[in-house]
C-alpha cells in the first residue's frame, strides 16, 4: 500500500517541510518528522531537528504509533516499558517525549506518522493535539493529490497513445497497413505544396495486379489476401523509405515517388516486375504462385490535382493491360 504512493526515497519537498515546521512551532517541539514505516526501516520524508533521513525499524517509536488509532502520545519515554531501553532514549539524542498523529490511506491502512519529539517529559494541550492531527490530515491530502496527478498523467499518456493508434488505423488499410485513400490524398496534397514551393517534381505509379480475380475464384479469398499482403511487403522492399505507398482498393495500389522523374519511376517499376517474377505469392508451402502487374506512370507537378493525375495514370494502366499486361506504360 505504501508503495502505491511512490513516496519513499523521494527528494525533500517544500510542501512537506512547511508542515513539519508548522508542527514544530505549534507544538513547541525541537523535533518534528514526517515518517513512513517500510518493511525494514523508518524513512523520513521531512524532518526538523533530527538530522537523519531514516532509522532502523527496531528502534522506531513510530512503528508502535501506527498500531494505535488517532494520536499516540508518550509523555515520558523513560517510564514506558516499550521505550525505556531504546537507544534513542538511553543515548543520543535522549528522546523523552513523543506525540504522533497517524498517517493512513483512504482505506485506513497505516503508513506512518507526523510526530513531534522533545528532550524533556511533557504533554500537549488540546489545541496542539487538534493541530497535530489536522496537519497529519494535510500530509495525507497532499499525498493523495500527488497520487491523483500521477494517475491523471498516466491516463493522459494512455489516451494519447490510443489517439495515435486510432489516427494510425484511420489512415491505414486494415489488411496491409499501407495508407488508405484518404491518407494518400493528404500526402498527395502535401507533395504538391512542396513542389509549388520549389521541390523537384514527383511521379505517380498506379498498379493493378493481373488476373487477381482468378486467384480468388480458384484458391479462395484467404489466398487472395495472402497475395495482397505479399505484394505490399514487396512494395516496401522495392521502393524507397520516402516513397508513399497506398492501397487504392481491391488489387489496385498507388505509389508516389517524391523528387523522381518519370524515367526513374519506370526503373523502379521494372524492379517491381522483376521481384514479382522471382517471388512466390503463397506462404502455405503449396505450389508456387507468381503474379504479374500492369503499371501506369505519370508525372506529378505543382499544378497537378489528385483526380487529374489518377485519371492520366489510369489511362496508362489501361494501355498496359491492352498491350498484354505485365508491363509498365508511362506518359510520353
Image: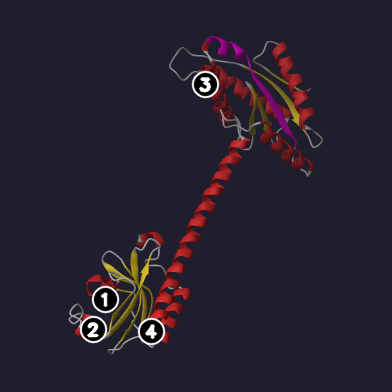
> Which sits earlier in the primary sequence, circle 2 or circle 1?
1
Q: Is residue 96 left or right of residue 202?
A: left
Q: Residues within 10 Å of mark 1 (few under 14, many from 20)?
A: many
- Which residue lies under the disc numbered 1? 61
The C terminus sits in image quarter: top right
Disc 2 vs disc 1: Cβ atoms closer than 8 Å?
A: yes
Residue 247 % position (x, y): 63, 27
Query: Is disc 2 surrounded by few (<14), some (14 to 19) or many (20+) residues within 10 Å?
Result: many
Q: Give the mark, 2 or 4, whose residue is nearer the N terminus.
A: 2
- Discs 3/1, front: 1
Label 3, residues with CA under 10 Å away: few <14, some 14-19, many ≥20: some
Q: Cβ–Cβ below 8 Å for labels 1 and 4?
A: no
The residue singled out by tag 3 in the image is 226
Magenta residues, start to end: 201-218
Residue tagged 4: 126
Residue 152 drawn above or below residue 73 = above
Q: Is residue 207 magenta?
A: yes
Q: CA distance from mark 3 to mark 1?
A: 70 Å
* Residue drawn at 69 percent across, 29 percent down: 264
How much space separates mark 4 and mark 3, taking CA atoms? 80 Å
- Image point (37%, 70%), residue name: 103
User: Mark 4: which secondary structure?
Assistant: helix
Quarter holding the N terminus is bottom left
Earlier in the chain: of badge 1 and badge 4, it is 1
Pinpoint residue 237: horizontal percent, then vertical percent.
56, 30
State the CA–CA distance, disc 1 to disc 4. 22 Å
**Disc nearest the viewer among 2 and 4:** 4
Q: Which residue is mark 2?
A: 77
User: From what the image shows, is residue 159 above or below residue 222?
Assistant: below
**Label placed on residue 214:** none
User: Mark 2 touching mark 4, by CB under 8 A?
Assistant: no
Amino acid at each position: 500500500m505504501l508503495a502505491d504512493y511512490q513516496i519513499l526515497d523521494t527528494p525533500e519537498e517544500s510542501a512537506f517541510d512547511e508542515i513539519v515546521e508548522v508542527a514544530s512551532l505549534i507544538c513547541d517541539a525541537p523535533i518534528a518528522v514526517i515518517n513512513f514505516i517500510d518493511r525494514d526501516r523508518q524513512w523520513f520524508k521531512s524532518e526538523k531537528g533530527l538530522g537523519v533521513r531514516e532509522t532502523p525499524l527496531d528502534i522506531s517509536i513510530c512503528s508502535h504509533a501506527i498500531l494505535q488509532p488517532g494520536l499516540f502520545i508518550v509523555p515520558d519515554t523513560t517510564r514506558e516499558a516499550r521505550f525505556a531501553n531504546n537507544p534513542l532514549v538511553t543515548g543520543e539524542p535522549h528522546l523523552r517525549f513523543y506525540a504522533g498523529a497517524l498517517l493512513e490511506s483512504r482505506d485506513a491502512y497505516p503508513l506512518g506518522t507526523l510526530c513531534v519529539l522533545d528532550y524533556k517529559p511533557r504533554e500537549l494541550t488540546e489545541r496542539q493535539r487538534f493541530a497535530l492531527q489536522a496537519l497529519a490530515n494535510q500530509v495525507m491530502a497532499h499525498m493523495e493529490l500527488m497520487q491523483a496527478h500521477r494517475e491523471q498523467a498516466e491516463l493522459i499518456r494512455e489516451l494519447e497513445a490510443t489517439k495515435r493508434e486510432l489516427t494510425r488505423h484511420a489512415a491505414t488499410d486494415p489488411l496491409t497497413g499501407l495508407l488508405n485513400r484518404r491518407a494518400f490524398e493528404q500526402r498527395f496534397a502535401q507533395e504538391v505544396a512542396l513542389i509549388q514551393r520549389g521541390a523537384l517534381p514527383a511521379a505517380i505509379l498506379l498498379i493493378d495486379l493481373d488476373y487477381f480475380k482468378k486467384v480468388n475464384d480458384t484458391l479462395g479469398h484467404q489466398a487472395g489476401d495472402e497475395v495482397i499482403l505479399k505484394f505490399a511487403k514487396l512494395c516496401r522492399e522495392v521502393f524507397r523509405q520516402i516513397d508513399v505507398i497506398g492501397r487504392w482498393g481491391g488489387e489496385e495500389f498507388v505509389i508516389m515517388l517524391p523528387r523522381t522523374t518519370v524515367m526513374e519511376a519506370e526503373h523502379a517499376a521494372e524492379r517491381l516486375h522483376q521481384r514479382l517474377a522471382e517471388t512466390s505469392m503463397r506462404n502455405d508451402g503449396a505450389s508456387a504462385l507468381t503474379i504479374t502487374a500492369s503499371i501506369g506512370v505519370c508525372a506529378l507537378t505543382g499544378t497537378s490535382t489528385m483526380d487529374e493525375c489518377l485519371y492520366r495514370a489510369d489511362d496508362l494502366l489501361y494501355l498496359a493491360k491492352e498491350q498484354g499486361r505485365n508491363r509498365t506504360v508511362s506518359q510520353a
